[in-house]
Image (spheres, rainbow, N blue to C red):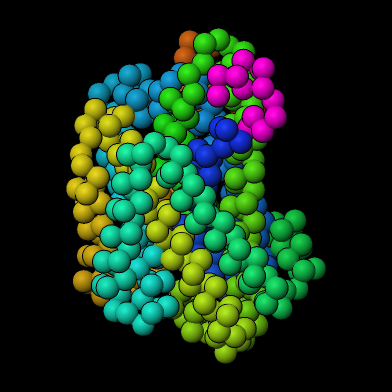
Amino acid sequence: MAEVLSGSRRRGAMWLFFGPAVIASVAYMDPGNYATNIEAGAGYGYKLLWVVLAANLIAMLFQGISARVGIVTGKNLAELSRENFSKPVTIAMWIVSEIAAMATDLAEFLGGALGLSLLFGWPLIWGMGVTAVVTYAILMLERGGFRPMEIVIGALVALIGACYLAEMFVAPVDWGSAVAGLTTPAMPDARALTIAVGIIGATVMPHAIFLHSGLTQNRALTSDAAQKARLVSFSNREVIIALAVAGMVNMAMVIMAASAFHQGHAEVAEIETAYHTLTPLLGGFAAAAFLTSLIASGISSSVVGTMAGQMIMQGFIRRRIPVWLRRVITMAPAFAVVWLGVNTTEALVMSQVVLSIALPVPMVALLIFARRPDIMGQFAVRGPILWLAVLGATVVLGLNFVLLWQSAGLPVPGLTE
């Protein structure tokens, strides 16, 4: 790595630093995305594809800034928040972030368990047990350094992508309508707006913004500004590649649901129903590929969610608890959902809405620190990048306000119910 940072080695240089964005990208392909994307595609065809694209572009921007902050400062976002904000603000941020982390793990853990349950015909509780064991085993790989974990997570990401690539060959896609949905913004009604906010909540993830700064903060030691600049450049390219893949997977989810369900099965809004409906429509292979990708998504994203939860706690309050205890705490809401008989897909969708409401906390904090020369020096974010980030945060905040307006039972002007 030292040779690459000094500029004496160029061949294959970027791949030595490839990994943090791959891990963060898992958050953009978690089971919450499956729930919101299936509902979007089945209910509205290809019309909400532009929302997925917009959310992914916002995600690229903020993940790139988060990685930049970690590289330049050697600190993660939670640590910077603790050092620069008042104690009451820090505690409030920590509480909101922990709630977001638990909502994240609810979606991830339930998704993996649901996939195992459907694929093997197990009771859901058995799937939850297997998911818990497998995720804990993967977390133990971190003891061997960052590379083994990155390889496993990267393999699971590749599996998810391969499954959806296969789906695209099986599903009867109307590519003309897909391109139109991708390039023509439209919001058919108030329910579509709720789904759109859910898509953003499932795509731009609070814990991923926290996590990325931590994954890059000590990955490579830099001795001067030139080495930091080289590392930031590598990071930006990795973010574009990793999140472009995540974005294409999300688009493929909506396209699959639109092509398979929208005509004749528009009522499909649950993962279980989608699986059972896929078999007679597209065959057993398509249904099995769907569940395989869901399991890989649930397991990988649950691992990443636990890593983020540890980082958030350690950064905000300087406390670290054993990994097994963190897993128990974050699994508790999922077991409560199953115990109470709550519909799992509804729980997944609502968890994404919670995440969307929590998202402004890391987004605003990140922008505050990234633009400050006293923290970032010559790497402070300014100009068009800063204004685009502010615009992205404003869009998210605006959608959150509209969601709260809807939740209060008030009509949104210009939208039918």
Rendered view: 276 above or below 181: below
Asked if residue 140 shows in the view, the reply is: yes
Start and end of the magenta stretch?
1-14
The verdict on residue 107 being magenta is: no
Indicate the quadrant where residue 133 lies. bottom left
The verdict on residue 7 being magenta is: yes
Rendered view: 404 above or below 4: below
Indicate the quadrant where residue 172 lies. bottom right
In this rendering, the count of numbered labels is 0
Residue extending farthest to the bottom is: 280
Q: Report the residue at 39% width, 36% height from top.
A: 145
Quadrant containing the N terminus is top right
Q: Is residue 237 left or right of residue 304?
A: right
In front here: 318 or 373? 318
In front here: 92 or 295? 295
Q: Report the residue at 50% width, 60% height from top.
A: 33
Image position, residue 193 (x, y; %): 55, 60
In front here: 168 or 365? 168
Image position, residue 295 (x, y; %): 43, 66
Q: Report the residue at 31% width, 71% height from top.
A: 127
Residue extending farthest to the right is: 176
Image position, residue 258 (x, y; %): 64, 73
Asked if residue 399 shows in the view, the reply is: no
Q: Is residue 90 left or right of residue 238?
A: left
Q: Report the residue at 49% width, 56% height from top.
A: 156
Rendered view: 325 above or below 168: above
Image position, residue 88 (x, y; %): 25, 27
